[in-house]
Amino acid sequence: EAGVTQFPSHSVIEKGQTVTLRCDPISGHDNLYWYRRVMGKEIKFLLHFVKESKQDESGMPNNRFLAERTGGTYSTLKVQPAELEDSGVYFCASSQEKGAGEKLFFGSGTQLSVL
Amino acid sequence: AQSVTQLGSHVSVSEGALVLLRCNYSSSVPPYLFWYVQYPNQGLQLLLKYTSAATLVKGINGFEAEFKKSETSFHLTKPSAHMSDAAEYFCAVRTGGFKTIFGAGTRLFVKA
């Protein structure tokens, strides 16, 4: 069974440019999450999809961030325009279970560096 | 509001020694608690979880954690460290919603 895959693994861009991160969850997983870890700090929740619908986007930093999950399969997270403070590791996770005890399956993350 | 505090960003032990990684949580309702591990260049993977059954939870690779409500703690232990245990460990808490709150992580170093 293929795991959660993220692309690219690394991205280096200049301030003001646009970057799009992609996440392919495990097939059949309705729940898809985006998280971000900045400079060795805690992993912070960004948003949660159930199929193609945004269930909770309370963690999105501002309107420069746009997440989509067309067709309820893969998801993209676009940052436009990127700022220096957007640098960090962006993780995607998926799950099939419903309920607070669900197990999350994580991708290996995208390291974003904004210069 | 829920929160997680991991005491010590770095822990170093000798091979064969006890591993103890500390986690304290804050939650206004009974929590679900998790430990995840991240090996280099990999995603996080679940080590173990507490979901209100037995307070002592056994996970993969010989790890276990004990839920202590009175201390609001969920410390992770392993009796004997192995070189392959070197990784970063994350404690996490979740209540009825879908948001998992993670701590800042503890990097475990294992010395030969």
Image (tube, coloured by chain):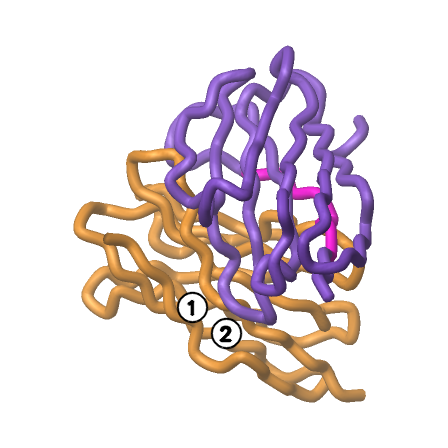
Chain colours: A purple, B orange
In the image, residue B7 sits, relative to residue B50, either above or below, namely below
Residue located 82% across and 44% down the image: A8
Which quadrant of the figure has residue A93? top right
**Please, what is the three-letter code of the amino acid marked with disc 2?**
Leu
Q: Is residue B62 visible?
A: no
- The residue that disc 1 covers is B75
Badge 1 density bin: few <14, some 14–19, many ≥20, Cα 10 Å: some
Left or right of B112 on screen, residue B54: left
Q: Nearer the viewer, residue B99 or B6?
A: B99
In the image, residue A7 sits, relative to residue B24, either above or below, namely above
In the image, residue B44 sits, relative to residue A27, either above or below, namely below
Residue located 41% across and 25% down the image: A55
Q: Position of residue B71 (x, y in %)?
A: 24, 69
Q: State which tag comes first along the sequence, 2 or 1.
A: 2
Badge 2 density bin: few <14, some 14–19, many ≥20, Cα 10 Å: many
Q: Are marks 2 and 1 in contact (CB under 8 Å)?
A: yes
Residue range of the region highlighted in magenta in the rendering: A104-111
Q: Secondary structure at mark 1?
A: strand
- The residue that disc 2 covers is B21
Q: Position of residue B91 (x, y in %)?
A: 47, 60
Q: Secondary structure at mark 2?
A: strand
